[in-house]
Image (cartoon, rainbow, N blue to C red):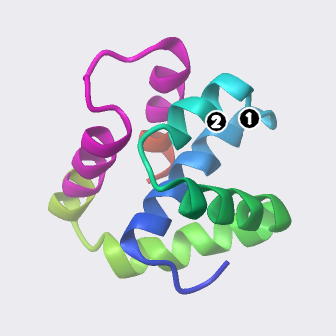
């Protein structure tokens, strides 16, 4: 996937983190999809699944260069993700796992 909007990039990052163990669970998909437009989520998930691991990494790196230029951008990126996808700040196990992996990726 190329030329992602900021929202698409955030969803893609979360999917990438959730797939770090090569298995996105139903619980993880529910946690991710619960806080975004269903059509956008399905489109991003289908695009993510269609990409190879190499393409996924390349997409993250290219978008990261567009949206994350310094530590402040990185903090803002995680803040937006946390506010949108994990609004209650109480992380279920799946959410905590995804967020931890995402911090390592970005």
The N terminus lies in quadrant = bottom right
Circle 1: element type: loop
Whole-percent x, y for residue 3 in the image: 53, 86
Residue 69 in the image: above or below residue 75 = below
Kindly report the distance in space between the C-alpha atoms of the residues bearing marks 1 and 2. 7 Å
Crowd band around label 1 with a 10 angstrom C-alpha radius: few (<14), some (14–19), many (20+): some
Residue under the image location 38 percent in, 40 percent down:
85
In front of the other: 15 or 42? 42
Pick whichever of labels 1 and 2 is earlier in the sequence. Answer: 1
Q: Is residue 29 magenta?
A: no
Q: Which residue is mark 2?
A: 29
Whole-percent x, y for residue 14 in the image: 53, 47
Q: Decide: marks 1, 2 in contact (CB < 8 A)?
A: yes
Chief SS of the magenta region: helix
Residue 106 in the image: above or below residue 104 = below
Per the rendered image, the range of residues in magenta is: 76-100
Position of 30 with respect to 26 (left or right) is left
Residue under the image location 64 percent in, 36 percent down:
29
Q: Is residue 80 magenta?
A: yes
Specify the label residue 96 is tagged with: none
């Amino acid at each position: 996937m190329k030329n992602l909007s900021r929202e698409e990039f955030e969803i893609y990052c979360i999917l990438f983190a959730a797939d770090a163990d090569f298995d996105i669970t139903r619980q993880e998909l529910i946690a991710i999809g619960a806080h975004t437009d269903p059509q956008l989520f399905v489109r991003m998930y289908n695009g993510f699944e269609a990409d190879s691991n190499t393409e996924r990494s390349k997409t993250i790196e290219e978008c990261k260069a567009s949206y994350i230029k310094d530590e402040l951008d990185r903090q803002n990126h995680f803040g937006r993700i946390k506010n949108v996808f994990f609004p209650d700040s109480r992380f279920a196990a799946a959410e905590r796992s995804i967020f931890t992996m995402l911090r390592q990726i970005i």
